[in-house]
Structures are given as structure tokens and as C-alpha cells.
Amino acid sequence: MIRRALVLLPGGELEVRDVEVQQGKITQVSPEISSPVAQEIDAAGLTLLPGVIDPQVHFREPGLEHKEDLFTASCACAKGGVTSFLEMPNTRPLTTSQAALNDKLHRAAEKCLVNHGFFIGATVDNLPDLRQANPTPGIKIFMGSMQGALLVDQEAALEAIFAEGSRLIAVHAEDQARIAERRQQFLGNKNPVVHSQIQDNQAALSATQLALRLSRKYQRRLHILHLSTAEEAELLRQEKPAWVTAEVTPQHLLLNTKAYETLGTLAQMNPPLRSPYDNEVLWQALLDGVIDFIATDHAPHTLAEKAQEYPQSPSGMPGVETSLPLMLTQAMQGRCTIAQVTKWMSTAVARAYGILNKGVIAPGYDADLVLVDLDTYRPVLRQELLTKCGWSPFEGWTLTGWPVLTIVGSQVVYERGKLYTDVRGRALRFEADAVGTPT
Ligand code: DOR
């Protein structure tokens, strides 16, 4: 039982409530619940939100565990208030078959503290796997910024995937041909700032245009991952079919190319950071509902890997421990509301992926919850991070809304710095026909 929390109710109001949870579910939400219970949490002064569902993470297991693994990543999730995640297929081996998907599900059941789902990765020749894989939130296509079998950059191969089946396709939209051409122009330039010029706005826009064209041709459920440019946001504002959704990362909202000056290659990611103008247009698109939700694209690399000279340095930055406080700090500064943060980080994600019974605090919903402190400001400190990579692009930022307590399936998994590492999340299920833009 959680007593006297300021609870975000389904209509968006914040009211003081008692919340009863039992056997994985929320059973009562009421101004005062009198029934006696075994465990009571006094949440006076704290705010209770649905747990975050992070719909794009790279957790590196199997095969790249020196960067992160499912245990360390899920500890970082628990600390960050992330109670469910959807993970990407660029592990080793690649998640491009049912066998590889089963292996990940098995590993996650053994060691993940939070709920989990795994994308199936498209190659040029695994259409049967893409059609049959289960359970999965959908098909991930790297249209660019990828090497090896997961790169699908030819229109004919893309069209074959869009034409076959009906499940959700999530695209990393960057134009590989344009990137390859521009890389030649910047050859020998070791300043990471050129990363944003090589993989420029046009590279992202062209690929997003192609994905939209194919989605429209086949009426195919499309999700555009980590939208990064003003041009893409304006395009979606003009013409976004009802079966298309889009996400943005906190990095693309809050960081821009100025970050290379202080962070160097730590600011390198794909798609790259853009200009302050892009930040503004993306924010407005999010506020207006053109962009549907938020993902971190948590993509850890070790500091030693990141210390290599550009372009040997790998792209990607971690995010699951900081995303909720980053966004709640924006809310407290008046940029958006707490209800919008929850919509973008829980409710809309659950709807878009057909994850039933999550993302809302109401009886019958799953008891995946996070209790945050919106009164205290604390800095992001490297020594407190749980991600195995051990750094954050937001180190030194002073944030509020830090999780005090995280609950997964009615079990406390994190409380004031302490992890309960015996807790295990569950494999997420995805309702196939839950398509369309969340409201
Ligand atoms: O920056 C990125 N890093 N973007 C991606 O799409 C992949 C990711 C990774 O896996 O490192």
C-alpha cells in the first residue's frame, strides 16, 4: 500500500491518494483506504507516476557485455524509474531469428529486474523470421548508420519488407548513400563536430520520406525512431498518416552541436545531435502531438572506446538513468506538464505498441510505478551511475524528479539508493492490432 502520494490520475490531475497493489496489479486508488496491509509505504510529499516504458534501448547482451548487460542495464532502469523496455537487435549474434529472440527472452527472464521486450531485426533475407517472430514489439530496420547484415538501405529490399505482413516496422531513418558520399568529403577530419555535418539533416529527411512513402503505399504500421531534425518534424506536421508514430530522445531535445565543445566524442550518436533550432522545432512537435513519445536510445560504449579519435569512436550514449528526471525537470521549469511527461514516457508508448494494462494508475492496471521527489534538486554524478559504461552526457546537470522508489509488478525493485536484485520483470506481450496514433 502506498499512502498519501500525490498521484497522477488518468485524467491528468494530481491528487493525494492511497494506492493499493496486490499480485502485480493496482487494486484500489482512493483518498483513503482503510483495509490493513502487510507493507505500507508513506509517500507523503512524493509524486506517484506510472513506470516509464522506454521503447528504444541497446542493452548489448549477448555478445557485447563489456559495454552493458541485461542485469546492469535493468539495475540502471530500476534506478531511473524505467519499469519496461524495448530492446534493439544489434547484439552479437544479431536478433534476426526466433532462436536469437528466444535466447534474449531466456536471458532476460533470468536476470532482468524490469519488464522486457525485444525487436526482431530486418536483414535482406529474413522475411519469414520477420513475419513469424513472437513475442516482439515489431521489426527494426536500420536504413542507415549500420554495418553488416542489419543494414537494409536498398529501396527494393525495404519495399519487400513493407509489402509483407502487417506488424509494426520501426525505422532508423538515415540515408546511407548520402552518408557514405559525405564521409568522403570530410575524410581525415578528426573533429567530432563534423559527425553532424556528414550525417546531416538531409540524410535523415530523405530516409524518413522514403519510409513514409513505403508505409503509405502498403498502409503499413510505421514507427519513426529518434526523430532528430526540424525538417522531419515539419514533414510529419504536414502529412502524418494515422498509422504512423514517431519518437524523440531527451538528447535531441536538450543537447545540440554545441555539446561537442565540452563532451567531444561523448556527444557522438546516430542520428547526430542537431542545432538549437532543431531542438526548438522538435519540442514544439512533441507539445503539439506530432511526435508521440520519448525513447532514450540508451546505447552505452566504454569510456576507452569513446576516447578513440573520430571517426573510430563509436556512436551512442546511455540514457535510462536520467531520462525521467531530465523530463520532469523540464516540467518543473514550465516547459511542459507532469501529465505530458507521463503521456510521452508511459501511456502513449503502451498504446502505440499494444502493451495492455500499462501506463495508467487505475484499478486493473499493472502495478509498475515510480515515486519521484519533485522538491529536491541533485546533480547527475558519474560515481552514482549504474550503467556499466559509467558515464552520462548529462553529468553535472542539476535535476529534480529523481526516483525515490520504483515498483515492478507490485514489488519494490529500487528504494532510496538500494536495489532489490531478486525482483524479476516479465516478458511484455504486444497486442497486434493496437495501431494508430495515440491521443
Ligand atoms: O548512436 C547510436 N548508437 N545509434 C544507433 O542507432 C545505434 C547505437 C548503438 O548501438 O551503439
Image (spheres, helix red, strand yellow):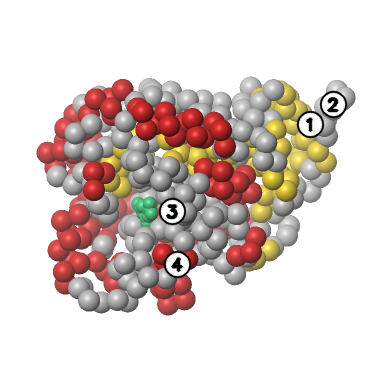
Work out how far the residue at label 1 is from the one at label 3, CA to CA, in angstroms.
35 Å
- Which of the two labelled residues, at mark 1 and mark 3, occupies the earlier sequence position? 1
Q: Position of residue 271 (x, y in %)?
A: 33, 57
Tag 4's secondary structure? helix
Residue assigned mark 2? 37
Respond yes or no on whether mark 4 lies under 8 Å from ligand 1. Answer: no
Total marks drawn?
4
Q: Position of residue 114 (x, y in %)?
A: 58, 37
Residue assigned mark 4? 304
- Which of the two labelled residues, at mark 4 and mark 1, occupies the earlier sequence position? 1
Residue assigned mark 3? 299
Q: Nearer the viewer, mark 2 or mark 3?
A: 3
Respond yes or no on whether mark 3 lies under 8 Å from ligand 1. Answer: yes
**Residue 32 relative to residue 285: left or right:** right
- Asked whether 96 or 202 is in front, the reply is 96
Q: Residues within 10 Å of mark 4 (few under 14, many from 20)?
A: few
Q: Nearer the viewer, mark 4 or mark 3?
A: 4
Dots 1 and 2: beta carbons under 8 Å?
yes
Respond yes or no on whether mark 1 lies under 8 Å from ligand 1. Answer: no
Work out how far the residue at label 1 is from the one at label 2, CA to CA, in angstroms.
7 Å
Tag 1's secondary structure? loop
Residue assigned mark 1? 1
- Which of the two labelled residues, at mark 1 and mark 2, occupies the earlier sequence position? 1
Work out how far the residue at label 2 is from the one at label 4, CA to CA, in angstroms.
50 Å
Work out how far the residue at label 4 is from the one at label 1, CA to CA, in angstroms.
45 Å
- Which of the two labelled residues, at mark 2 and mark 4, occupies the earlier sequence position? 2
Mark 4 residue type: Ala
Relative to 313, residue 156 above or below: above
Q: Residues within 10 Å of mark 2 (few under 14, many from 20)?
A: few
